[in-house]
Image (cartoon, helix red, strand yellow):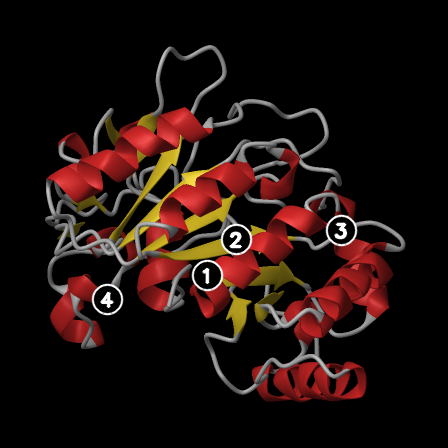
Amino acid sequence: MAAPKTRPLDPAKFRDPLVTAKGETRATVALAGLRTLWVNTGTLCNITCRNCYIESSPRNDALAYLSAAELHGFLEEIARDALPVEEVGFTGGEPFLNRDLPAMLRDVLSRGLRALVLTNAMKPMRHHAAALLALRDAFGDRLTLRVSLDHHTPLLHDLERQEGSFAQALEGLDWLAREGFRIHVAGRAAFGGEAEAASRAGFARLFADRGIPVDAQDPVSLMLFPEMDATADVPEITTACWGILGKSPDSLMCASARMVVKRKGAAAPAVLACTLLPYDPQFELGGTLAEAARPVPLNHPHCAKFCVLGGAACSR
């Protein structure tokens, strides 16, 4: 059965941060408590995917490499202000292209925090094998590697990423499993029209065949993310939607997370409301975590489709 066609986004929508196109009050999300700090290590990546929401590639350096010294300042702010941060997540681009990543991970983990790295598990990760093994020995399961595997078959995965990338990602996964790292996997929901149950069953077979210790039925161990298309027509989220949908604003990512980025040419990093909207200036909240603690208007299609209606979250 063919996938249903989406209508193009109504240009009147998502224009005003306070009201919707129908004149209703737009929903906002207050920061209930900063539990997850995301760090974008830079948009450069060793591959170019067909549908990368952040447009990472070997040439896109719109977000520059963040340094260990720059992250250290935010970690010091967390400690000084006794912020309730539990985990620091690293995303990109490919985080392992940033040479400061091992130092950043050690700074995070040595403070008793958890660390999560989103990686394609290809050659850049393996270049840091010795540093990773040392971190595993020192901090054990407080370090998690979440490997991107769009589908459980090479055909669809390679169609999205590049030919041969499935085999290379599995080689990296195999190494992580053999060496006893804590592993999660991130895939795509309904990829190729496949139902979630069938997708999880396919991943389960793959993991069992290769001895990869990931529970495919656990939505955290295997996260299947909904598709993101900012041009598809989605409803705007109003204050009335919380009651209609039976959903709490505290369940959204921006109620408990912020992301640090370093824009190309910028003198200092900035703090954003969301990992999904790195280029939209309305979601840049300041230069410190304190400045970024203000409420976030849900003024983007991703807020509606990915978070409120899709129920997705980038952390546990």
The mark closer to the camera, 4 or 3, is: 3
Q: Label 3: which residue? A: 122
Q: Residue furthest right?
A: 164
Amino acid beneath label 3: Met
Looking at marks 4 and 2 on the same chain, the residue that comes earlier in the sequence is marked by 2
| Element marked by disc 3 | loop
Residue placed most toward the observer, 269 or 162: 269
Q: Label 2: which residue? A: 117
Structural distance between the alpha carbons of marks 4 and 3: 33 Å
Density class for disc 2 (Cα within 10 Å; few <14, some 14-19, many ≥20) is many
Q: Label 4: which residue? A: 251
Looking at marks 4 and 1 on the same chain, the residue that comes earlier in the sequence is marked by 1
Q: How many tags in the picture?
A: 4
The mark closer to the camera, 4 or 1, is: 1
The image's mark for residue 139 is: 1
Quadrant where the N terminus sits is bottom right
Which corner quadrant of the image does residue 100 belong to?
A: top right
The answer to whether residue 80 is above or below residue 253 is above
Residue placed most toward the observer, 38 or 255: 38
